[in-house]
Image (cartoon, helix red, strand yellow):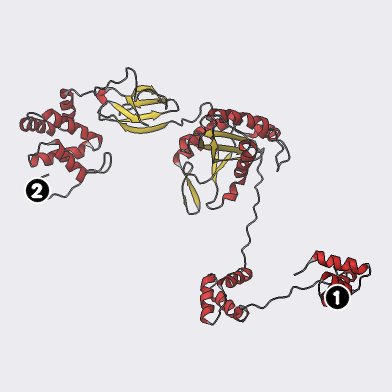
Amino acid sequence: MKNEPLENTIITLHCEGWPIRRLSRELRISRKRIRRVLVSNQTQRDTTPGEVIIAKKKRQSKLDPYRDTIAELLDKYPDITGQRVFEHLRERGYDGKTTIVRDYLGSIRKKGSKTPVRLTRTEPGQRAAHDWSDYNIRFTSTGKTEKVIFFSYILSYSRRQYIEVVDDKQQKTLLRALINTFIYFDGITREIKSDNQKACVDHWEMGQPVFNKKYLEFANWYMFKPLTITPCRPQENLKIERPFWYLERSFLNGREFRDRDDLKEQLRKWLTQVNDTRIHGTTKKRPIDMYIGEHPFLQPLPANHFDTSLVVQLVVNQESCVQWKGYLYVVPEQYMYEVCPVRITDDHLVVYSPSGEQLVTHPLAGADHPQRYVGAGEKTRKKPDLVITDVISRLEAFSPEMTGYIDQVKRHKPGSWRYHLKNLLALKVNYSVEDIMVAVRRAREYKVFDSGVVAGFLENNSEPRYSIKLSFKCNNNQGL
């Protein structure tokens, strides 16, 4: 093993006049080794580095006799694994280890070169990009670490950025964040690029993205062309991915946040005081200065913004309420068991009749709402009940045949006919009137007047409400 301190001692003492014999005696090493050190040093001193290059000696390997065999295997099976090559060589007498085989395969196989990434140069007002990113942030007020979602939008020309803290990654949240972005920048680019998130892209077909219907409506409203990256090619969106790295390094790093409100407030200040005024690494200019030149090329905002409210169909339950996210919103009692359109905005819930007439508007209940019921004159514990005459009139509206069946239920269930009629009306929640009437005709045929049996027949033989009509296999000589 080479010992540089010892060699230096030999050389310096020999220069002082020590003979080789004395060096051998004092240093307790052989005279041959001393001569070898002195000759080697003198050779190196007399030879310039560019004249002689000492080739590295190649050691023999157990794999050398099998290199031709490996070449044949690779020609025949280009994708063969190292383990399979090792097994073939073992059959031919190879007694080495598999590590040598895998290292040799890695050295001779052609490694595919990566495709170079070239950022597309965009004109002012031409394109922007948006994306999400999740971070675990500890809040000092609670001492707990929570998941926080950031929405980011960047103008591709000026590199000016808008970042917002959001609650989730749903489409409604995305559209609301985009509207906030348009207001922040006071304009809209002609193209907006996203990744393949479900809020924007439904699927890919024939190599082309199929955008979500509502997202296309949103794009038409603000007159921009939606774009997306190619699947498995995240490098196409580097202009939005890289700024998240800067957010981590410049904003999240070395800061403490009391709660989410404090986080949002510090983020707003950082965007204008730091992110807008820094010198960008690519443009070598401040984003705010570049934005001043880009702003005239942005499309103007429309007079009215896109309606991002969610419209759903909810059933008015037996408490004369519609349920949304754990809270019950009061609806007029005459709409019990009806399916009503409900519009949910950022701060209100509006209930409409099946015909489209607005019935009632309630403030959207937050996490701090004291009661489960929402509405004027808070609900009491007593559940509302339908007037039996109203139940009969609504059942008779199904079909003229219901009048005869109602009379038979009254006659055969004298003590509980009201209960059974109300249950029959409640079936309208899940089944169409046509399906219910098929079940009632079946019940009359077999003289069955129990609402539970009718409900069981519907469950086994019908589709949910508003789907295809009821079809069933008639079993001869059998009842419901």
What residue is shown at x 94% (from left), y 70% (from top)? Answer: 17
228 shown above or below 141: below
User: In the image, is 112 to the left or to the right of 24?
Assistant: left
Q: Where residue 120 is drawn, which disc sits there? A: none
Which mark is nearer the camera, 1 or 2? 1
Q: Position of residue 156 (x, y in %)?
A: 63, 40
Q: Check the image and report above or below for 130 versus 475.
A: above
Q: Secondary structure at mark 2?
A: loop
Farthest-out residue, left: 411
* Closer to the camera in the image, 318 or 146: 146
Task: Determine whether, in the image, residue 348 is placed left or right of residue 275.
Answer: left
Mark 2 surroundings: few (<14), some (14-19) or many (≥20) residues within 10 A: few
Q: How many marks?
A: 2
User: Residue 193, image x and y in percent?
Assistant: 56, 43
Q: In this view, which residue lies farthest toward the top?
A: 377
Is residue 223 visible in the rendered image? The answer is: no
Residue 434 in which image quadrant: top left
Q: Is residue 331 left or right of residue 424?
A: right
Residue 21 in view here: yes
Looking at the picture, does residue 7 appear above or below residue 279?
below
Residues at marks 1 and 2, CA–CA distance in whole angstroms: 114 Å
Closer to the chain start, of discs 1 and 2, is: 1
Mark 2 belongs to which amino acid?
Answer: Gln
**How many C-alpha atoms fall within 10 Å of the one at disc 1: few (<14), some, or many (≥20)?**
few
In front: 381, or 309?
381
Residue 25 placed where, x, y %? 85, 73
Kind of element beneath mark 1? helix
**Quadrant of image for the C terminus:** top left
Q: Position of residue 318 (x, y in %)?
A: 25, 28
Question: Farthest residue in the front direction?
Answer: 25
Residue tagged 2 = 478
Q: Residue 35 has which mark?
A: 1
